Amino acid sequence: WYVPTGTLEQRLLGSSPHTETVTAVAFGRNGTILASASYDRTVKMWHVESGKLLKTLKHAGGVKAVAFSADGRYLASADDAAVKVWDVRTGKRERLMRGHTFDVTALAFGAGSVLASASEDDTVRTWDVESGKELRVLKGHLGMVTAVAFSPDGSAIASGGYDRTVRLWDTDTGSHFHTLLGHSDDVLSLAFSADGALLASGSGDRTLRVWDVPTRAPPPPPPSPPPLPPWLPSHIFKPPPPPPESPAALCRDEVEDCQPAICVVFHEFGVRHCKATCGHCTELGLPGEDELGLEVYGDSDFEYGAS
C-alpha cells in the first residue's frame, strides 16, 4: 500500500504464492525486501517494487512469526517452540535457539543482535543471535504472550497477551517496570511510535489503544537506619574521646631521671598524687610526700597513701 493515498501498490503473488493464511509480515532494512510467514510452512522473501519472489524458507510447521534484524543481515522465524535465524543473503539457517516450552507467537529485533520472542509458555525471552545465547527470561504474564515490540532505542520491551495487559520491561536487566491496564480481551499486537513516546496496542476487544509510554522510576534510595530508642543515648555510638595525657607521661617525656610511675592521677576526684623523687612534680606546683607518706591536695578532705 502507498501510505499517503492509501492506494494498493503491489500484490505479492509471484510464481509461487502462499497457499494458506499469511500470519505475519516484516520489512527489511531499506524497505526493499518484505518477508511473509504462513501456515503453509514457509517464509517467503519478496522484492517489493517488482513483486518478484526472491527466496522461500521451508519449515516443519505453520509459521506464526517473522522479523528482520536492524542491519538486515538476519531473518528470525518460528513455527514451534524454537526460534530459527536465517542469513538473508544466502537463505541458509544459521541458528536454532531453544528455550521456550510451547510455541513462539511473536518476534521482534532490538538494537544490534538482540532478539525478543513471545510464547504460549507465558514468557518473553531475549537472545543474542550472533552467539545463539539466551539472555533473559521475562516472567510476569498470567497467560500466553502474543505480542512483543522493542522501543526505537532498544532500551525497553513491550509485551501483551491473554491476561489483557501490556507490560513494559527493561531490556538490559529484564526487570518489569510498568503494566498498562484497559483492554477487556487478549492483547494481540503492539507497536511503538518512531520517537518512542507512544505505544499502540490492538486487542480482541475490537479496540486500538494508544498509550503515553511511562518513564522508568529511579531506584529507591537506600533505607535509613532505624531511630534510636528514647532511652538509648545517641552518643554511645560515637567513639569515646582519647583520655587526657597523664602527669606520669609528662615526667617520663620531660625528665630523664624520673621513674615511670612518678605521678598518679585520680581523675575521679581531680586530684594528683606524686612522689617527689625528682622534684619535677614540685616544680609543676604539685605537693610532695610528707614524712608519713601522706598528702592532701587542694580543698579535698580526702587523704591518699603514697604508694
Image (cartoon, rainbow, N blue to C red):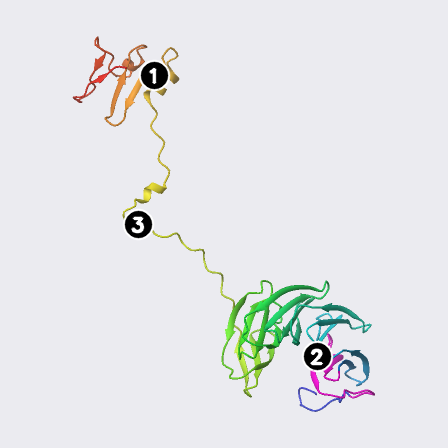
Find the magenta span and give its range: 13-40
User: Of helix, strand and loop, which one carries label 3?
Assistant: loop
User: Which sits earlier in the primary sequence, circle 1 or circle 2?
Assistant: 2
Quick one: label 3, few (<14), some, or many (20+) residues within 10 Å? few
Q: Position of residue 129 (x, y in %)?
A: 71, 66
Question: Could you say which quadrant of the image residue 197 lies in?
Answer: bottom right
Q: Amino acid at mark 2?
A: Ala
Residue 47 spot, x, y in % from top left: 79, 81
Q: Residue at x 66, y 64 (%)?
A: 134
Mark 1 neighbour class, 10 Å CA radius: few under 14, some 14 to 19, many 20 or more = some
**Residue shown at 75%/84% (left/top)?**
40
When the figure is inspected, residue 65 is found, relative to residue 6, above or below; the finding is above
Q: Is residue 35 magenta?
A: yes
Residue 89 lies left or right of residue 162; in this view the side is right
The label number, if any, that marks residue 229 in the structure image: 3
Q: Is residue 45 magenta?
A: no
The residue that mark 1 highlights is 261
Q: Are marks 1 and 2 in contact (CB under 8 Å)?
A: no
Which residue is at the front of the view, 232 or 71? Answer: 232
Q: Which residue is mark 2?
A: 26
The crowding category of the residue bearing disc 2, from other C-alpha atoms within 10 Å (few below 14, some 14 to 19, many at least 20), is some
Q: Earlier in the sequence, mark 3 or mark 1?
A: 3
